[in-house]
C-alpha cells in the first residue's frame, strides 16, 4: 500500500524574505553561513517571495535521469536520498527536476538537495514568521491505515462531506470494544444505523432520540461497568442533537460525570432534514428557516457556544477540533478516550457542510482551515487541572471575510452584518484568551506533533 | 509445445526500458511482464561508463536495479537474449541465445537503444580499437588506459571527450581527431567549445578539429593513423567515438516503419498495432518542428520510456509527448557546461551572450518571439530542468529578459515558483 509522508509547507503570504531559514539550513548542512549553499532558497519575486525546495516527489524525475543510481526514494520516510559515494557529479539530475530541488553547490562542485534533516528540518523552527511548517500528519494516516475500519463500506453521505473521515477515523481509533450512539442527524443518515436489518458499523450501535442520547448511553455504560466489561461509550451527535433538544440530557450526563466520550459533529444546522437553523447556526447564515429575501437576511441571533458551556460543567475533558488539523484532532481524541475512562469527555469538531453551506465539494478542508485561520472558530482544550489552553495561536488572524466569502450561505451579507460577525469573532477571541491566560499550568507535549510540527515553535500556545 | 506468453514484453534494459517497466507496474501490478535484453548484466546506464573507465565507479556499483527488484514485482528478467525478429501480425517475438526462442506478447516495447558507429576507414578491420557503449566495453577500456602511453580518440562528441579526459588524467598523451570544425558541435557554440578545448589543451591533450582519418594500419603496439592532410599519428590505444546509430536488424519483414530510427507518434506507438518504441532507437517529434528527429539523450529516453509504459498499460494519466528538447550537462576537469534547447538557432532569433574572462563564465541564450529557444552555459550554473520547462511551456520572457540573462538561475527559479510550483 502507498504511504503518506511528512512535508515542509511554505506560506508565501507570511514570508518577509528575512533569510533565517536559509542561514539555518546552511549552518546545518555546511557548517557555514553562506546562504547560496542552503538547500532551501527563498527569493524576492515581482509579486512576493518565491521558493525553490525539493518536493520529495512521488514520481521523482531526478531519480529517473540519474545514470549512477545515486538518487532513490526511501519508502519509509519518502525522502529522495542522495548517495555521495555513487554520484559521479554529472549534474543530469538538475535537468530532470523541474523545481530546482536539486542543484549544484559551487563550493563542493557536487549536487545538493534537501533531506528534511532526518525528519526535523532546521529551517522550519528558524522561521520567525511561521511561513514554514513541517506537516507531520502523515504519521497518523500510516498508523491508522493499519487499524481495522469499523464502518460499513459505502456511505450515503453528500459528496465532499468530511463526516465520513471523522466517523471512520474515530471508530478506528476507539477500536472494537465500543458501544456507539448516533442520534438523528447526518451520521445515521450516512448509514451508521444500517439498513435491511444490518448494522452500519462493526461495533454495537443504537439510534436514540435527539433528546435522550447522553442519558441512554450513560445507562448502557453503567450496565457494562456493572458487568465488569471495559468498553468505550461513544456518542457521535450533530449540533442539533447536542445543543438544542439533546442539551438537557447532555448537561445532566456531564454534571453527573458519566464515563462517556461525546463527540459533536458541528455543521451548524439541521442539515440532514433540509438545512434548518439550530442554536449553533452563526449570525447572518442562510438556512431554510432563516431565509434570505426582501425582509429576512439570514439568522438574526449569534450561535450558542456549546463547548464553552461544557467547560462550565467542569467536564474531565473538553476540546474543540477541526478536520483541517488532523494531528491536533488525533491528539485530542487520544486524550478524550483516556478521560472518558473516568469521567465525561466532550470533543467538539467543526464540520463544514458542502450542501447546507453551499461550497464546491472539493473545498471542505479549505473551508475548515479558513474557519480556524480567521478565528471564526478557535482550537483549544480544557481540563479542570490544567485549565483552558489554545492549541494554535489566535494572533494575526485573517479577516473574517476570507472565511465568509468561500461559501454561499453568507453571500447576501451586508457590510453591517459582516461587521457584526467580525466583532463577534473579536469578542469570542478576547473571551477565550482571557480564560486561557488564567490557566498557567503547562500542557503536556502532544503525541503527534513532533519537533517543528504544526504545533511546534512558531505556533505554540501563548500561555 | 505451446509458445511462451507474456502480456508485456520490454526489449532492452537501459533507461527507456526501466522507466517503461516502472510505469507499467505503477498501473498494472499483475500483468505478466518480461524484459529481454542483449546485455549480460542487470540494468545500468551507458552514461555512467566514463566513470567505470576512469575507475571512479566499480561495475557492481553502477547497477540501476538489483535482481530483487524484478523478483518482487514478478518480472521475468532475461539477460543475454537479443531480439532477432518480430512478427507483429502474430504478436510473436523471436529471441536468440540458448534460452531464447519464440515468445508471444500482447504489447511490445522496443527500447534497444543505439550502438556505436564504426566509420568505414580503410584498414580499420586490421587494427584493434575500442568503443564505449556497454559495461563490458568500459571494463575493457579501464584495463587498457592503465598502460596506454599514446592514445587517439576519434570523435569529439561527449563520449569521446569524456574518454579523452580519463586518458589524460591517467597520464596518456591524448589526441582527439574530429571531422567537424569544432568539438561538441551538437550542444555548444564556438565560444563554449573553445573554453572546453582550452581545458583539454591545458591538461596536455591535443585537439585536431576539421580533420579526417583516411587510413589505418597496424603497428608494433597498436595502430598508425593517416589524416586527410597527410599527417600521421601513432596510437597504442584507439577509441572510436564517432557517433551512434540504432541497430534495427530485427525489424526486417516486420512492417514496422523506420527512418533513422523507429518512427513513433506522440504516445511512442509505432505504425503497427501493439508495438511501441522509445529511447535512442526511436525517432519522435521534435519540440521545435513537426519533423521526427533522433534525440539520443538520457532524459528523453527516460521520458519516452515512461510514456510508452503508460500507454501500454492503458494508464489514463498519460500525457502526450511534447516533443524532444535537447538537454545536456557536461562535466570536464572540474568545470561544467549545461546545454538546454536547440543548439541551431532559428532565423530571426535574438541571441544574447556574455562572457567573463576572469571567471571563465559564459552564457548564451537565444529567444524567439520572447520565448526561450535555448540556453547554454559554461561554469555558470542554472537549473536545466527549470529552463526546459520555460521552453516547453513557451513562457514569455520579454518582461524579465534583461534580468534573466544576467541571472538565469535566480530568475528561472522565481518564474518556476510563480508558474508551476
Ligand atoms: C559514454 C556515454 C556517455 C553518455 N553521456 C550522456 C550524457 O552525458 N547525457 C545524456 O543525456 N546522454 C548521454 N549518453 C547517452 C545515453 O546514455 C543514452 O541516450 C541512453 O542510454 C539511451 O537509453 P536507451 O534506453 O534508449 O538505450 P540504451 O541505453 O542504448 O540501451 C539499449 C538497451 O537495449 C539492449 N539491446 C540492444 N539491442 C538489443 C536487441 N536486439 N535485443 C535485446 N536487447 C537489445 C541493450 O543491451 C541495452 O540494454 C551517453 C552515452 C554514452 C555511451
Ligand atoms: S529533486 Fe526535484 S525531481 Fe527530485 S524529488 Fe526533489 S523536486 Fe522531485
Ligand atoms: S549529479 Fe550525481 S545524483 Fe545527479 S544525476 Fe549525476 S550521478 Fe546522479
Image (spheres, coloured by chain):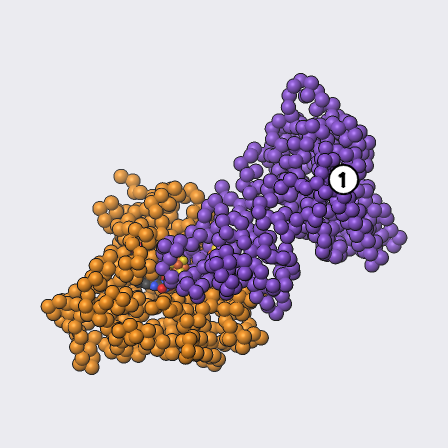
Return the residue found at the far left.
B220
Q: Quadrant of residue A88?
A: bottom left
* Residue B175 in the image, given as x and y percentages of width and height: 24, 73
Q: Position of residue B127 (x, y in %)?
A: 15, 67
The letter of the purple chain is A
> Which residue reaches farthest top?
A227
Give the colour of chain B.
orange
Looking at the image, in which quadrant does ligand 3 appear? Answer: bottom left
Q: Residue at x 47, y 59 (%)?
A: A30
- x, y percent for residue A160: 65, 46
* Depth order, front residue of B28/B251: B28
Q: Quadrant of the N terminus of chain B?
A: top left
Residue A57 on image: x %, y %: 50, 53
Quarter containing the C terminus of chain B: bottom right
Q: State the residue at coordinates (74%, 57%).
A: A399
| Residue occupying image coordinates x 54% and y 61% | A23
Q: Which residue is at the front of the view, A36 or B17?
A: A36
Direction from residue A292 to residue A374 in the image, left or right: left
- Tell me if B256 is positioned left or right of A127 in this view: left
Q: Secondary structure at mark 1?
A: helix
| Residue pictured at 20% horizontal, 79% vertical | B228
In this figure, which residue is indicated by the disc labeled 1? A307
Check the residue under mark 1 and report the chain it is in.
A
* Label tally: 1
Q: Is mark 1 within 8 Å of ligand 2?
A: no
Q: Dot 1: few (<14), some (14–19), or many (≥20) neighbours within 10 Å?
A: many
Would residue A419 be seen by someone viewing this image from the given angle? yes
Image: B326 above or below B76: below
Note whether residue A165 is visible: no
Amino acid at each position: 500500500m502507498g504511504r503518506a509522508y511528512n512535508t515542509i509547507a511554505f506560506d508565501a503570504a507570511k514570508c518577509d524574505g528575512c533569510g533565517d531559514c536559509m542561514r539555518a539550513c546552511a549552518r546545518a548542512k555546511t557548517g557555514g553561513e553562506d546562504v547560496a549553499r542552503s538547500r532551501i532558497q527563498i527569493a524576492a519575486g515581482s509579486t512576493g517571495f518565491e521558493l525553490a525546495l525539493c518536493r520529495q516527489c512521488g514520481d521523482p524525475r531526478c531519480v529517473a535521469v540519474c545514470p549512477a543510481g545515486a538518487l532513490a526514494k526511501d519508502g519509509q520516510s519518502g525522502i529522495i536520498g542522495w548517495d555521495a559515494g555513487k554520484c559521479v557529479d554529472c549534474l543530469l539530475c538538475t535537468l530532470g527536476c523541474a523545481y530546482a530541488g536539486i542543484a549544484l553547490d559551487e563550493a563542493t562542485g557536487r549536487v545538493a538537495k534537501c533531506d528534511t534533516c532526518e525528519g526535523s528540518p532546521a529551517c522550519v523552527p528558524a522561521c520567525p514568521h511561521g511561513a514554514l511548517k513541517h506537516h507531520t500528519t502523515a504519521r497518523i494516516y500510516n498508523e491508522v491505515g493499519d487499524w481495522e475500519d469499523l464502518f460499513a463500506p459505502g456511505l450515503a453521505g453528500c459528496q465532499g462531506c468530511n463526516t465520513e473521515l471523522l466517523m471512520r477515523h474515530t471508530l478506528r481509533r476507539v477500536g472494537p470494544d465500543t458501544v456507539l450512539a448516533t442520534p438523528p442527524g447526518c451520521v445515521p443518515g450516512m448509514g451508521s444505523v444500517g439498513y435491511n436489518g444490518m448494522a452500519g458499523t462493526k461495533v454495537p450501535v443504537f439510534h436514540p432520540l435527539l433528546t435522550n442520547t447522553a442519558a441512554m448511553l450513560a445507562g448502557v455504560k453503567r450496565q457494562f461497568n456493572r458487568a465488569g466489561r471495559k468498553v468505550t461509550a461513544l456518542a457521535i451527535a450533530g449540533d442539533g442533537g447536542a445543543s438544542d433538544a439533546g442539551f438537557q440530557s447532555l448537561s445532566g450526563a456531564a454534571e453527573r460525570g458519566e464515563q462517556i466520550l461525546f463527540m459533536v459533529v458541528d455543521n451548524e444546522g439541521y442539515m440532514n432534514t433540509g438545512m434548518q437553523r439550530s442554536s449553533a447556526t452563526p449570525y447572518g447564515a442562510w438556512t431554510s428557516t432563516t431565509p434570505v429575501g426582501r425582509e429576512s437576511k439570514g439568522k438574526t441571533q449569534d450561535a450558542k457556544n456549546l463547548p464553552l458551556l461544557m467547560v462550565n460543567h467542569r467536564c474531565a475533558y473538553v476540546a474543540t477540533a477541526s478536520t483541517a488539523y488532523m494531528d491536533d484532532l488525533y491528539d485530542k481524541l487520544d486524550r478524550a478516550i483516556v478521560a472518558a475512562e473516568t469521567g465525561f469527555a466532550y470533543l467538539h469538531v467543526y464540520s463544514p457542510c458542502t450542501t447546507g453551506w453551499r461550497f464546491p465539494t472539493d473545498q471542505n478542508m479549505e473551508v475548515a482551515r479558513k474557519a480556524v485561520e480567521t478565528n471564526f472558530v478557535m482550537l483549544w482544550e480544557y481540563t479542570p487541572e490544567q485549565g483552558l489552553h489554545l492549541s494554535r495561536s489566535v494572533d494575526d488572524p485573517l479577516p473574517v471575510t476570507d472565511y465568509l466569502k468561500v461559501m454561499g450561505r453568507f453571500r447576501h451579507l451586508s457590510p453591517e452584518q459582516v461587521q457584526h460577525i467580525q466583532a463577534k469573532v473579536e469578542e469570542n477571541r478576547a473571551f477565550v484568551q482571557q480564560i486561557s491566560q488564567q490557566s498557567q499550568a503547562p500542557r503536556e507535549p502532544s503525541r503527534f506533533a513532533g519537533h517543528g510540527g504544526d504545533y511546534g515553535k512558531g505556533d505554540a500556545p501563548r500561555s | 509445445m505451446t509458445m511462451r506468453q507474456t502480456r508485456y514484453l520490454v526489449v532492452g534494459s537501459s533507461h527507456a526500458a526501466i522507466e517503461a517497466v516502472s510505469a507499467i507496474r505503477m498501473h498494472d501490478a499483475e500483468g505478466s511482464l518480461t524484459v529481454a535484453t542483449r546485455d549480460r548484466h542487470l540494468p545500468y546506464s551507458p552514461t555512467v561508463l566514463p566513470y567505470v573507465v576512469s575507475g571512479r565507479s566499480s561495475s557492481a556499483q553502477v547497477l540501476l536495479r538489483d535482481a530483487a527488484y524484478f523478483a518482487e514485482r514478478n518480472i521475468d528478467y532475461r539477460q543475454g537474449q537479443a531480439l532477432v525478429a518480430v512478427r507483429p501480425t502474430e504478436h510473436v517475438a523471436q529471441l536468440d541465445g540458448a534460452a531464447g526462442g519464440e515468445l508471444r506478447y500482447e504489447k511490445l516495447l522496443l527500447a534497444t537503444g543505439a550502438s556505436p558507429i564504426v566509420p568505414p576507414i580503410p584498414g580499420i578491420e586490421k587494427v584493434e580499437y575500442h568503443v564505449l557503449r556497454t559495461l563490458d566495453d568500459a571494463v575493457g577500456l579501464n584495463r587498457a588506459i592503465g598502460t596506454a602511453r599514446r592514445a587517439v580518440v576519434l570523435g569529439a562528441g561527449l563520449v569521446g571527450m569524456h574518454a579523452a579526459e580519463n586518458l589524460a588524467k591517467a597520464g596518456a598523451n591524448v589526441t582527439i581527431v574530429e571531422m567537424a570544425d569544432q568539438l561538441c558541435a551538437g550542444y555548444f557554440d564556438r565560444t563554449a567549445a573553445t573554453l572546453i578545448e582550452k581545458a583539454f589543451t591545458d591538461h596536455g591533450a591535443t585537439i585536431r578539429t576539421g580533420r579526417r582519418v583516411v587510413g589505418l594500419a597496424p603497428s608494433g603496439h597498436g595502430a598508425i593513423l593517416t589524416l586527410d592532410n597527410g599527417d600521421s599519428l601513432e596510437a597504442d590505444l584507439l577509441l572510436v567515438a564517432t557517433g551512434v546509430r540504432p541497430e534495427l536488424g530485427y525489424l526486417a519483414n516486420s512492417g514496422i516503419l523506420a527512418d533513422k530510427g523507429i518512427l513513433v507518434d506522440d504516445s511512442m506507438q509505432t505504425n503497427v498495432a501493439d508495438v511501441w518504441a522509445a529511447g535512442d532507437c526511436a525517432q519522435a517529434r521534435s519540440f521545435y518542428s513537426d519533423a521526427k528527429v533522433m534525440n539520443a539523450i538520457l532524459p528523453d529516453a527516460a521520458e519516452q520510456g515512461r510514456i510508452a509504459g503508460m500507454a501500454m498499460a492503458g494508464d489514463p494519466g498519460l500525457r502526450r509527448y511534447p516533443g524532444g528538447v535537447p538537454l545536456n550537462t557536461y562535466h570536464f576537469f572540474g568545470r561544467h557546461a549545461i546545454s538546454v534547447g536547440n543548439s541551431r538557432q532559428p532565423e530571426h532569433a535574438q541571441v544574447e551572450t556574455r562572457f567573463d574572462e576572469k571567471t571563465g563564465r559564459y552564457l548564451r541564450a537565444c529567444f524567439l518571439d520572447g520565448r526561450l529557444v535555448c540556453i547554454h552555459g559554461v561554469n555558470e550554473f542554472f537549473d536545466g530542468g527549470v529552463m526546459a520547462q520555460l521552453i516547453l511551456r513557451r513562457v514569455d520572457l520579454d518582461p524579465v529578459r534583461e534580468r534573466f540573462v544576467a541571472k538565469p538561475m535566480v530568475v528561472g527559479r522565481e518564474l518556476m515558483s510563480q508558474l508551476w510550483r
